[in-house]
Image: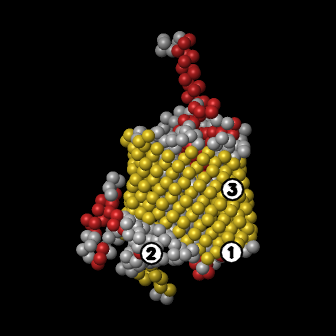
Amino acid sequence: MTILKTKKWTLLLMGWMLMSFAYPTLTHAQSVYEHTSNTGIYQFLDELANNQWIDINSAIKPYSRHYIAAKLVEAEKYSSEMNKRQRQELAFYKKGFGLEIYKKLHTNPRLNPFKKAKNLGFDINPLGVFYKDSLFSFQAQFLYGYSFMKNDNGSNLFGYGGLQGYGYVGKHFGFYASLRDMHYKKVLNKVEYLNTIPGGLFKGSTTREGVDWSEMRGGLTYQWKWGEVAIVKDHFEWGDNQHGSNILSDKAPSFGQIRLKLTPAPWLEINYVHGWLVSEVIDSTKSYMDGHPQSPRYRAVFFNKWLSANMFTFKPLKGLRLSIGNSIVYSDSDNIAYWIPLFVYKPVDHTYNAIGSYTDGDSGQNSQLFANVSIRMIKHLHIYGSVFTDEIKFSRITKSNLHNPWSWKGGFQISNLLVNNYSFTFEYTRTLPGTYQHRISSTTYASNRYVLGHFLRDNSEELYARLVIRPIRGLSLQGEMFVQRHGPNVLYITGKDIITEPFMRHVAWQNKTIAFTANYELFNNVNFFAKATLSNISGEQDLVKLWTPEYLRGKQTTMMAGFQIGL
């Protein structure tokens, strides 16, 4: 104690305490995942990474809130190189992640009705109720969104409401939950429709125009210095993209899963997911009649269905990430071998299902292989690409009448080159016939019948371009165009027929769209937007009807405006 009485040590201690309260600490290592629908923060992180101010693995999403907070703190070292808008964006998003960055609760005292409660507060930026002490912290907020659309087919609206919250206990545990009810006046996201709108399980009849559905996401997490494990029900994306991943996308409704992430070395990251999918294939041996004899009911029981997937990401050079992984969709009974994160799963399938010994291999499961490359070695430029295949046989490569069922995506993004406050993105995606299909209905690459891969599914291609201008903090002016083409609806019957089917014999369905969007993020996760879309969806009448919402068929100019409180 005598040392602390000296003026020198007293000043040092006071300075250290002030720094601890005023500046980022990030002393706790906990995981709560930020959903990819929060495009504002994800696009800002891309911008920071493209400027080489931070280093991210953009092939694996979502990021945890602590990971995002750490990257914002890391970027602050380059604030002198940033322009005014970027510095303001950085300060804005740091405020949104204050629960992760600062030791003390940071809320506006003028807006706080809980002034007598030391650790409890309310704020509008970010919007919510907050609590933080040395052991426990949380944020809770209500969710509400509304958008109105108008075109030649009449009016449409989309709305949602609910609650969400997240928090941390101690230095390692995290938790989060998000519940929302959603409604379309005229449905736009049926399982057959070819668009990026996430799917849902609709309440009541699906033949009516309007639909209602709900979504529950969340989970429990545990993180340590070089890894994390989580039990969650949520979306996730694997594969770099700006308009739909072709490896694992967020098109399907969220499903329960166990996640594992390991970073045992600075140059290596291992990601693993074991998911409980929904087959929607009825198991007649387990289904039964129930209810009163005068009002019997059929209790349908689905076949069990699981996904096991891993991705190994290597960083041989600064700005270069190479990822490779594989997955398997399997049904009927679980198997501990598919729980091993380091495995290649196809040989495991061969062992346990005696491929080739019975019924021409139909006892087997459905395995996949994929890879991703991300290059940020040139300032302002991100080059990326991914490939996904259901099956590879090298003997087919030299034969013009055969193909391997695969999908590939390539693209680049330029940020702030020569001129500040803009980004330009270009992507091309091609998927051959049979890539996401399988002849056994209980092992398809899908959950609730929504594809796990690219939203355009098999036998398709897309050209996508986007220009985003951000003149001031929070405002984005976006113009985008895409041409989507789909060939005939080729069905996977035997597997032998699909590999002889040429890519897109003719264009059976086509979507040409130009869209302009203005979005202003007033507070963290509070957005107001307006959008004008000029679209022309054409093709064979039966396929246009099958793959396109009635509201959007033909040539349409669709005007939309709305707001979002919580994403």
Picture quadrant where residue 78 is located: top right
Which residue is tagged 2? 501
Q: What residue type is labelled 1?
A: Gly
Q: At 52% from the left edge and 15% from the top edge, which residue is drawn?
A: 9
Which of pointers 2 and 1 lies earlier in the amino acid sequence?
2
- How far, Cα to Cα, is label 3 from label 1? 21 Å
Q: x%, y% of residue 561? A: 73, 60
Label 3, secondary structure: give it.
strand
- How far, Cα to Cα, is label 2 from label 1? 29 Å
Q: x%, y% of residue 359? A: 29, 78
Q: Please tell me how crowded label 3 is: few (under 14), some (14-19), or many (20+) other residues with Cα within 10 Å.
A: some
Q: Which amino acid does label 3 sit on?
A: Gly
Label 1, secondary structure: give it.
strand
Label 2, secondary structure: give it.
loop
Which of pointers 3 and 1 lies earlier in the amino acid sequence?
3
Q: Please tell me how crowded label 1 is: few (under 14), some (14-19), or many (20+) other residues with Cα within 10 Å.
A: some
Which of pointers 2 and 3 lies earlier in the amino acid sequence?
3
Q: Which amino acid does label 2 sit on?
A: Glu
Q: Nearer the viewer, mark 2 or mark 1?
A: 2
Q: x%, y% of residue 477? A: 71, 52
Q: Is residue 352 above or below residue 209?
A: above
Which residue is tagged 1? 554
| Marking on residue 479 | 3
Q: Is residue 398 left or right of residue 409?
A: left
